[in-house]
Amino acid sequence: MIQVRGLTKRYGGVTAVHDLSFTVRPGQVTGFLGPNGSGKSTTMRVILGLDRPGAGSATVNGRPYAAHPDPLRQAGSLLEVTPAHGGRTAYHHLLGLARTHAIPAARVTEVLALVGLAEAAGRRVGGFSLGMRQRLGIAAALLGDPSAIILDEPVNGLDPDGVLWLRTLLKSLAAEGRTVLVSSHLMSEMALTARHLAIIGRGRLLADISVADLVARVGADAVLVRGPRPTDLRDLLVRHQATVTATGPGALEVAGLSAETISALAFRAGLEVHELTPRRASLEQAYMELTRGEKEIR
Amino acid sequence: MSGVTFWRVVRAEWTKLFALRSTWVVLGVVPQMLVGLSALIGAQGGGTGGGAGGVTQAVGGGFLVFAVVYGGFGVLAMSGEYGSGLIRATFAAVPRRLPVLWAKAVVLVAATGPVLVVTYLLAFLANQAFAGRPIGLGDPGVVRAIVGVAGATVLVGLLGLGFLLRHTAVAVSAYLAVLVVLPPVFVALLPGALVPYLPTVALQAMFHVGAAVPPMPSPGAGAVVAAGWVAAACR
């Protein structure tokens, strides 16, 4: 469980995060979503004790991350670019981290196999591709078998196979009862893995909502109907409790009735219909709606 | 117990240090070069007669070369982690800076100390084997000077370690400036009473044998001053 309470962080005169509160629960993937520069990385750095908050607090499993005697077993993390010295092998990079917690060398071999780097274990990190580095960073995050996983934009640099692999991995980690917090600026990516979303813009919380609720909130599904006699069609549908708006010559947007019902009603009334298009408001649209005006180039 | 302890951090830093090729070069190849160089200087009659001044030269002639190499080694141990971003992974595992710095210091002393004692001993023997008027190991001050110069070089490495600037190139340059380039300027400018407190002067005093002009602090006093600089740097 990760809890962020009233978190505020300023860099010089710029407020990166303002009074941010949300909870990341175990057993599901939580997407941490926001445009670039919205404060996602800052928040993650504070959660991991790499930055001090100006006000508020962030705890992992009930305590500040740095106050745990065994931080790698509490939360595994990967911040934007995989940090590793190019001169060490993947194996020795992980072994150096493992030693701090007396994690056995066998576990190093295990996580390397888990992320698909078993073959590359003895190669120097300097020669790794971005995707391989990203896998190494994920291996490091899993090293301590932590109850929470915190990943900042982990799909960066992964090839399509890698992205697919990561989605499966994140879901299975959550299914094991772990707390999984993954940041992204892409709703499309989060829609495929996350069950809960914390959405921020300009350092402020815009929504702390389950994906299902967000779908329900924005999913006032509408149907686009086109026909030669729009007025008759409108009167008919309004009599059946639909909300109808004219969107163009001969075109109506109908809310409150399914495409099937509209078709049946029109057929019985003898009204011709030239187009009948169900429109589902996408998560992407909901996200754009929420973050409109919150984008900021930094 | 499954958590972080200081000795586990030391072990981790030991693992990290010896997983780098450069470590093997600094600890394996550089000492051999220095021994060879000492022999060459001895054969060229590198000016070392008998007497006290000769001891200092014969034992500590390679000090400045080593100071540059091991100082840089120390600087890289810490600022190299900032350069590669590795420091984030390190601090994620050990979320406090000082235990990491001190663990690196312990490892640096343990790894370089024995190597340096042996290297300076061999360099001295090689130098004298080829020199005209050999100074023996049993001559006054020789053993103490060997231990002193090895200790001084270890302290140089520790100074470098504490010389924490996040940009490696800047850190190395600034380090060299402070330890090698600026001291003659300081010696000229500072009132005489302050000169013994300069790190380089204190370090050189650690292996000095006999009288010096200008006068130097005693080896013990030099060691205390140098250790004070290290303590100030590594915190």
Image (tube, coloured by chain):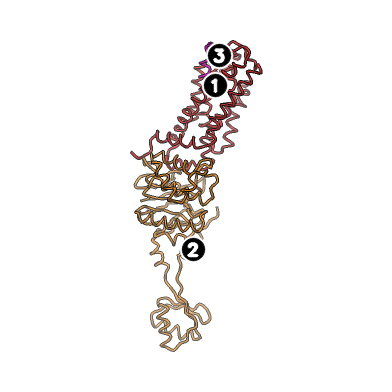
- Residue A5 seen in the current view: no
* Quarter in which the N terminus of chain B is drawn: top left
> Where, by quadrant of the figure, is residue B65 drawn?
top right
Q: Nearer the viewer, residue A245 or A82?
A: A82
For the point 40% across and 62% down, which residue is it? A211
Q: Are marks 2 and 1 on the same chain?
A: no
Q: What's the magenta region?
A: B137-151
Residue B172 image position (x, y, % from top left):
58, 33
Q: CA distance from mark 2 to mark 1?
A: 69 Å
Residue B120 numbered mark, or none: 1
Q: Nearer the viewer, residue A105 or A154?
A: A105
Q: CA distance from mark 2 to mark 3?
A: 77 Å
Q: Amino acid at mark 1?
A: Tyr
Q: Are marks 2 and 3 on the same chain?
A: no
Residue at numbered disc 3:
B209
Q: Tell me if mark 1 has few (under 14), some (14-19) or many (20+) residues whose alpha carbon lies within 10 angstroms of its own.
A: many
> Where, by quadrant of the figure, is residue A173 drawn?
bottom left
- Residue A123 seen in the current view: yes
Q: Which chain is orange?
A: A
Note whether A243 is above or below B222 in the view shown.
below
Q: Are marks 2 and 1 in contact (CB under 8 Å)?
A: no
Residue B125 image position (x, y, % from top left):
56, 18
Q: Nearer the viewer, mark 2 or mark 1?
A: 1
Q: Which chain is red?
A: B
Q: Chain of mark 3?
A: B
Q: Amino acid at mark 2?
A: Met
Residue at numbered disc 2:
A288
